[in-house]
Image (tube, helix red, strand yellow):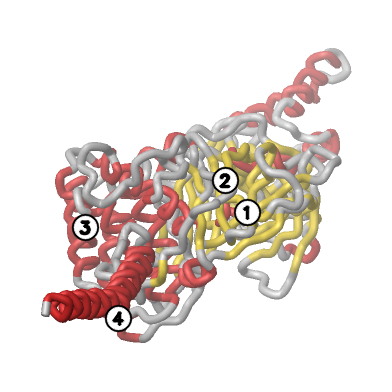
């Protein structure tokens, strides 16, 4: 009986052990697999971070739309293994959305095409004043209007002179005693010569033995009367000017040369120029003289060109436009880069150099030394080597990504904490105002163009108010610009235009939002530099107006660094200096 019970207990214990073992194998391993799979999935999910290519500060754990601009979020690529910790990586998708373009830097001829404006003027060496040699009253004017041509020796006027009548009578009396008093007779003749009477005229007077009451005034030179200074019946003194006469067979063309172009223009440079009132004809000449002194009001010097005036085609005061293909004073080639590649902070100039690695594409900021400005490009004196590839478009987006990643950037060359729109502890807004705004020609709808028109209308009012030194109107126009900007619907801009307008409007809003709190016109003029840069970029990108817009430049604005603005009129009205230097500036570009 006892053996049976022992056997039963052993069988029960064995069965229970086998059951526990099978349960652990079946259920325990299954749960372990589920746990491992769950953890792996969670780990995979945690590694995928979604961001916006235009707003890298956006970080989300799942895909969707950017809460700022509405663009599709893209996966944020890991920067582990990045070769240079100071570089900012960008995925091909982000580069495409940010419209980043690059170019390889190479050496080339550092030439510059300089556009000059000027006027035709009379040759000062061929100007003369016709004066009267005798005093009296004008009895007859043979030349009585401005612009008439006169020849040397032609009678211009007849003058009645009581003094000359008396001198003739003295001559007749001296003639009577000529045999006994020859010296007296000769003295009477010399007196007439003092009034510029010729020996022939004096001999005729002696021979006729009659007093001449009206004497002719003869032209000394040939030319055109440019100024008539007397009328019939006027009493004149000896030596008084009657006419100004100009020989227009040769004329001067005087071009305005701004300080920034002085080093490029030299005596002997060839100029190709046109005259607005003579369409279809091109003239050529060489610079014969450059003023050694700059005009303190207009801040320009005059470059003179001498021209033979065949057929009198060139008339004084005609407007001219010339072009000089200037070259640097050095004989070697130089590195040149487009202006769009350079970001300028006021003290430093930087570019973004592209680097390729196994991990992908990255950009690193490089400080450069700028040489002469070549129209749409700069000479690079130091900081780049031939063969390096740099960003020439979309640099603003690269710099923004670098700032947000804490990498060295334009405003933060040492790197550090990423800046965000909520940083109220520093002068982030001031830095943002100085950031360059990119532009790229693109097409927008008529509704989008219409939405931009109030913004431009208020901008031009602001420009006119600054040129008129009107602080109150300038502030009111700035506030109106800010209100117009806030009413523009972002959804009207599609595709490439969306990202462009987003960047331009953000930069514009940054500088306009505090304009109503500015206390003087000087502060508004400082803001106007950034305002104009954004408006120029908008005008070049979207062509919003049906009329021609002129881009104008003052080399003295912005602490002598130069500044631009937009105008509907070709005439210069400087908003940065107002009445003190109203005409200082030049037209550098037209947007049609």
Marks 4 and 1 sit apart, C-alpha to C-alpha, by 54 Å
Dot 2 or dot 3, earlier in sequence: 2
Q: For marks 2 and 3, give the one nearer the viewer.
A: 2
Marks 2 and 3 sit apart, C-alpha to C-alpha, by 47 Å
> Which residue does the image show at 34% across and 74% down from the upper left?
33
Q: Circle 4 sits on which residue?
A: 26
Q: Which mark is residue 477?
A: 3
> Which residue does the image show at 49% across and 55% down from the upper left?
79
Dot 3 or dot 4, earlier in sequence: 4
Dot 2 or dot 4, earlier in sequence: 4
Q: Are marks 3 and 4 in contact (CB under 8 Å)?
A: no
Q: For marks 2 and 4, give the one nearer the viewer.
A: 4
Marks 3 and 1 sit apart, C-alpha to C-alpha, by 45 Å
Q: Furthest-bottom residue in view? A: 446
From this viewpoint, is residue 237 visible?
yes
Q: Furthest-right residue in view? A: 179
Q: Residues within 10 Å of mark 1 (few under 14, many from 20)?
A: some
Q: For marks 4 and 1, give the one nearer the viewer.
A: 4
| SS assignment at label 3 | helix
Dot 1 or dot 2, earlier in sequence: 2
Residue 346 on image: x %, y %: 46, 38
Q: For marks 3 and 4, give the one nearer the viewer.
A: 4
Residue 455 on image: x %, y %: 28, 67
Residue 120, picture quadrant? bottom right
Residue closer to the observer: 250 or 295: 295
Dot 4 or dot 1, earlier in sequence: 4
Q: Is residue 566 above or below residue 530?
A: below
Q: Residues within 10 Å of mark 4 (few under 14, many from 20)?
A: few
Q: Is residue 373 above or below residue 414?
A: below
| SS assignment at label 2 | loop
Q: Circle 1 sits on which residue?
A: 355
């Amino acid at each position: 009986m006892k053996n049976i019970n022992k056997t039963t207990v052993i069988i029960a214990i064995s069965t229970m052990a086998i059951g526990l073992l099978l349960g652990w194998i079946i259920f325990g391993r299954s749960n372990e697999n589920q746990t491992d799979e769950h953890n792996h999935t969670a780990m995979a999910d945690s590694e995928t971070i979604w961001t916006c290519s235009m707003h890298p500060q956006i970080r989300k754990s799942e895909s969707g739309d950017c809460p700022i601009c509405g663009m599709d979020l893209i996966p944020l690529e890991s920067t582990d293994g990045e070769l240079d910790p100071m570089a900012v990586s960008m995925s091909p998708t982000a580069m495409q959305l940010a419209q980043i373009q690059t170019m390889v830097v190479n050496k080339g001829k550092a030439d510059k095409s300089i556009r000059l404006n000027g006027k035709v003027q009379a040759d000062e060496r061929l100007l003369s004043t016709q004066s009267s040699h005798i005093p009296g009253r004008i009895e007859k004017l043979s030349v009585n209007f401005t612009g008439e041509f006169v020849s040397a020796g032609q009678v211009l006027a007849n003058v009645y002179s009581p003094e000359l009548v008396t001198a003739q009578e003295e001559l007749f009396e001296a003639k009577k005693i000529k045999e006994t008093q020859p010296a007296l007779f000769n003295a009477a003749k010399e007196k007439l010569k003092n009034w510029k009477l010729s020996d022939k005229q004096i001999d005729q007077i002696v021979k006729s033995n009659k007093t001449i009451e009206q004497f002719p005034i003869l032209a000394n030179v040939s030319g055109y009367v440019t100024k008539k200074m007397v009328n019939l019946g006027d009493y004149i003194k000896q030596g008084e000017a009657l006419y100004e006469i100009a020989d227009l067979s040769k004329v001067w063309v005087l071009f305005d040369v701004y300080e920034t172009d002085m080093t490029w223009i030299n005596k002997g440079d060839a100029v190709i120029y046109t005259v607005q009132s003579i369409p279809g004809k091109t003239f050529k000449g060489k610079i014969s003289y450059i003023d050694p002194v700059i005009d303190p009001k207009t801040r320009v010097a005059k470059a003179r060109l001498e021209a033979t005036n065949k057929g009198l085609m060139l008339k004084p005061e005609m407007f001219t436009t010339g072009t000089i293909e200037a070259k640097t004073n050095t004989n070697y080639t130089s590195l040149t880069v487009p202006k769009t590649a350079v970001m300028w902070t006021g003290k430093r100039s930087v570019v973004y150099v592209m680097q390729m690695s196994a991990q992908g594409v990255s950009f690193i900021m490089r400080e450069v030394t700028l040489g002469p400005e070549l129209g749409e490009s700069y000479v690079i004196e130091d900081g780049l080597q031939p063969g390096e590839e740099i960003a020439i478009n979309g640099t603003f987006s690269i710099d923004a990504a670098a700032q947000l990643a804490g990498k060295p950037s334009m405003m933060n060359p040492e790197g550090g904490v990423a800046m965000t729109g909520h940083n109220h502890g520093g002068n982030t807004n001031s830095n943002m105002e100085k950031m360059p705004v990119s532009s790229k020609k693109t097409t927008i709808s008529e509704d989008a163009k219409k939405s931009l028109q109030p913004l431009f209308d208020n901008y031009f009012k602001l420009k006119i108010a600054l040129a008129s030194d009107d602080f109150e109107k300038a502030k009111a126009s700035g506030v109106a610009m800010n209100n117009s900007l806030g009413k523009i619907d972002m959804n009207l801009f599609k595709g490439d235009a969306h990202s462009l307008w987003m960047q331009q409007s953000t930069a514009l809003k940054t500088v306009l939002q505090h304009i109503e709190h500015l206390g003087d016109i000087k502060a508004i003029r400082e803001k106007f530099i950034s305002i104009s840069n954004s408006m120029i970029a908008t005008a070049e990108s979207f062509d919003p107006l049906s009329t021609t817009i002129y881009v104008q430049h003052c080399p003295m604005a912005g602490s002598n660094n130069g500044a631009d603005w937009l105008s509907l009129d070709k005439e210069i009205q400087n908003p940065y200096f107002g009445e003190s230097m109203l005409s200082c500036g030049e037209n550098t570009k037209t947007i049609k």
